[in-house]
Amino acid sequence: MPSGRQLAYEHLKDTVLSDPAMQGQFVNEQALADEIGVSRTPIREALLLLAAEELVQLVPKRGAYIAPVGGRELRELFEFRTMIECYSARRAVELDAVPLDAMRAELAEQRSLAGEDQARAFIDRDHRFHTALVRAVGNDMLTKTYDGLRARQVRAGIVALFRAGDRRKSVLAEHEAIVAALAARDADAATAAITAHLAATQRVLLEG
């Protein structure tokens, strides 16, 4: 059974940090403790872990602050993602290990998530879509590095959906282009589609 600290850490990372309404806000430790059903000690321990990952800022006498995602952080995040995902596309094609079934399944699930209250689920599927490609390479260190971006990736993706009303439709089309290129075993087209997709999301976030 997960410890109180682990429960708090996962809830903060997967739910609180990705909530657009929490950007620029301080964490209410007592409310969070009541919601999860733990004392405030595990909450504080979890916040220390998140602060070490630079996902929250600990402000003396104020608590944990969730800073809005800044321009530099976004540029670095998308630059890093582009490097990893483009490499993964080329390597998966070389290895004849493109996970088409898994990527198409995630894309099909995304198409079914059209409701405004399903933004989080949509972005969770988005993350799984991209992760399937990275994992197909079979490099555990690469996969773990990419998994470490998850909180930032989900957070940025959800914010992008709320900033651009048609972003969900665009994401689906961009994912379809990636899958089509990979299905054709065209590494150049796949990397171009991935680059365009990530650049579009970054543009929405930086212009919002």
Image (tube, grey):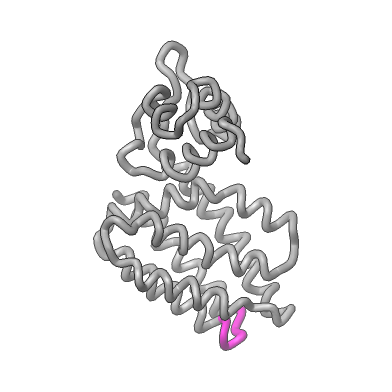
State the quadrant of the N terminus. top right
Q: Position of residue 31 (x, y in %)?
A: 37, 26
Q: Tell me where residue 22 sits by quadrant.
A: top left
Q: Position of residue 141 (x, y in %)?
A: 74, 54
Residue occupying the point 68% across, 75% down? 92
All told, the count of numbered labels is 0
Residue occupying the point 40% across, 69% down? 110
Residue occupying the point 33% across, 58% down? 118
Task: Give the camera-side residue of 60 and 16.
Answer: 16
Q: Position of residue 50 (x, y in %)?
A: 55, 32
Taking 158 as reference, is 5 above or below it? above
Q: Extreme bottom residue here?
A: 184
Task: Give the camera-side residue of 117 and 156.
Answer: 117
Taking 2 as reference, is 187 above or below it? below
Taking 89 as reference, is 75 above or below it? above
Taking 46 as reference, is 77 above or below it? below
Q: Extreme top residue here?
A: 61
Magenta region includes residue 68: no
Task: Give the camera-side residue of 199 and 54.
Answer: 54
Residue occupying the point 29% across, 55% down? 117
Q: Tell me where residue 93 sits by quadrant.
A: bottom right
Task: Give the camera-side residue of 195 and 96.
Answer: 96
Magenta-highlighted residues: 182-187
